[in-house]
Amino acid sequence: MGSGGSKPVEVEEEISAFTKEEEWRNDQGLQYTVIVVKGHEGSKASLMGRYINEGQTYNGMPIFVKRQDGKGYMYYSSTGKWNLAFKRSDLGENLGAIGSAEPAEKPFTGRDNGLIYKYADSKQKCFVEDKLITLEWE
């Protein structure tokens, strides 16, 4: 059994080796692979749907891609907010048609996180809060 000094070093190394991807697990230890976005019925309704984690990251967090009836991207912006965008090129510009009102590590609303989302209203030229938008993992 020898020296007991190596155990704490191993534990420290293990802890420092954790990545944000490993933190992206639900209470049962399953990784979030699909996020369902729903609730908005306005001009950005085409962004509602199922987003799939395809293994790519941006700003250290997973990018989720919408494949059904059109394209959409959900990503973690450099401001710490979650955005839903129509084009992949919007990622580099921190643009999104829908975005979380506050910064958060995880994008979920309701039972999982309590975030509120806003959508870009081109008529009013501002972001408008929409409490009907929900994001939940599947």
Image (spheres, rainbow, N blue to C red):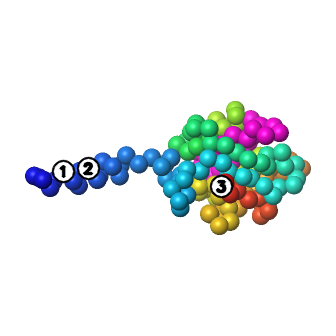
Q: Residue at 53% of width from left, 61% of height from top?
A: 27
Q: Residue at 48% of width from left, 49% of height from top?
A: 22
Asked whether the beta carbons under mark 1 and mark 2 sit within 8 Å of each other, the answer is yes
Crowd band around label 3 with a 10 angstrom C-alpha radius: few (<14), some (14–19), many (20+) = some
Crowd band around label 1 with a 10 angstrom C-alpha radius: few (<14), some (14–19), many (20+) = few
Secondary structure of residue under mark 1: helix
What's the amino acid at mark 3?
A: Trp
Secondary structure of residue under mark 2: helix
What's the amino acid at mark 1?
A: Ser
Q: Residue at 69% of width from left, 40% of height from top?
A: 65
> Is 69 left, or right, of 78 in this rendering?
right
**Among the 4 quarters of the image, the one containing residue 101:** bottom right
Is residue 80 at all visible to an observer of this figure?
no
Among numbered discs 3 and 2, the one appearing first in the sequence: 2
Q: Is residue 84 magenta?
A: yes
Residue 111 vertical placement versus 43 (above, below): below
The magenta-colored residue range is: 64-87
Q: Position of residue 44 (x, y in %)?
A: 83, 48
Which residue, as the protein is rendered here, is positioned at the far top? 89
> Is 8 left, or right, of 127 in this rendering?
left
Query: For residue 6, which numbered disc appears in the image?
Result: 1
Is residue 54 at all visible to an observer of this figure?
yes
Question: How far is disc 1 from disc 2 in space, using C-alphas?
Answer: 6 Å
Q: Position of residue 62 (x, y in %)?
A: 58, 43
Residue 2 vertical placement versus 87 (above, below): below
Q: Which residue is mark 2?
A: 10
Query: For residue 43, which numbered disc appears in the image?
Result: none
Q: Which residue is mark 3?
A: 137
Question: How far is disc 3 from disc 2 in space, using C-alphas?
Answer: 33 Å
